[in-house]
Image (cartoon, grey):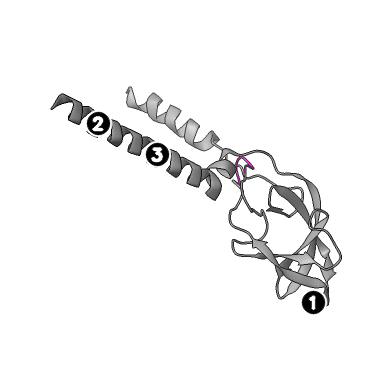
């Protein structure tokens, strides 16, 4: 008899749980800490493309909306970013989609995320140098203290 109320309570929680997914206001790409809104109806001519400057490397979390690094809520990982002739990358960049280039316009700076720091190669290099230096000092002192004992 005690199992029926527990089972009923369990079923109520299972049925009432909802699934959510974030709905984005517009498609965007993030490059070097800047968010660019992709203008899907503004195309760039082949002759206006200067060079590849980056690519989508991460995807935002669909539940929280958090993202870091070179991310996009619309384009898959590996989608290339390009500089546009005569336009500063602080104003707009181009994104390759279906063998054509679409304009992406700067909207705002990307929010801070700790992974931007942790995944930075310079940060990793500094940490490795500090660890190696610390290990060297410890080994040097331990050898020196062994010589003093004998």
What is the spatial separation of the Cα atoms under label 1 and label 2, in whole angstroms? Answer: 66 Å
Judge by depth and name the residue closer to the eye, 123 or 18: 123
Pick the front one: 110 or 10: 110
Mark 3 Cα within 10 Å, few/some/many (few <14, many 20+)?
Answer: few
Q: Say which quadrant the C terminus sits in.
A: top left
Residue 25 x, y percent position in the rendering: 76, 48
Q: In which quarter of the image is the N terminus?
A: top left
Numbered label attached to residue 133: 3
The disc, 2 or 3, on the residue closer to the chain's N-terminal end is 3
Residue tagged by mark 2? 144
Whether residue 19 appears in this view of the structure is no
Q: Is mark 1 on a helix, strand or loop?
A: helix
Residue 122: x and y, percent? 55, 47
Q: How far apart are marks 3 and 1 (CA)?
A: 50 Å
Position of residue 136 relative to residue 104, above or below, is above
Q: Decide: is 121 above or below 132.
A: below
Task: Name the residue rendered at 76%, 53% in the picture.
Answer: 36
Magenta stretch, overall SS: loop
- Report crowding for label 1: few under 14, some 14 to 19, many 20 or more residues within 10 A (C-alpha): few
Q: Which residue lies furthest to the left in this view?
A: 150
Q: To which residue does mark 1 refer?
A: 46
Task: Tell me which label, 1 or 2, sits earlier in the chain.
Answer: 1
Q: Which residue is drawn at 60% across and 64% down?
A: 78
Q: Is mark 3 on a helix, strand or loop?
A: helix
Label 3 vs label 1, nearer the camera? 3
Residue farthest to the top, as pictured: 2
For label 2, the crowd category at 10 Å Cα-Cα, with few meaning under 14, some 14 to 19 and many 20 or more, is few
- Label 2 vs label 3, nearer the camera: 2
């Amino acid at each position: 008899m005690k199992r029926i109320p527990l089972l009923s309570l369990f079923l109520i929680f299972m049925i009432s749980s909802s699934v959510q997914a974030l709905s984005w206001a517009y498609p965007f790409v993030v490059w070097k800490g800047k968010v660019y809104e992709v203008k899907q109806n503004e195309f760039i001519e082949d002759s206006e493309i200067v060079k590849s400057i980056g690519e989508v490397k991460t995807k935002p979390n669909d539940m929280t909306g958090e993202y870091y690094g070179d991310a996009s809520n619309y384009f898959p990982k590996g989608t290339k970013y390009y500089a546009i002739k005569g336009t500063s990358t602080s104003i707009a960049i181009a994104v390759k989609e279906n063998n054509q280039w679409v304009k992406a316009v700067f909207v705002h700076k990307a929010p801070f995320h700790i992974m931007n720091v942790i995944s930075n190669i310079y940060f990793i290099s500094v940490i490795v140098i500090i660890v190696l230096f610390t290990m060297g000092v410890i080994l040097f002192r331990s050898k020196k203290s062994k010589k003093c004992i004998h």
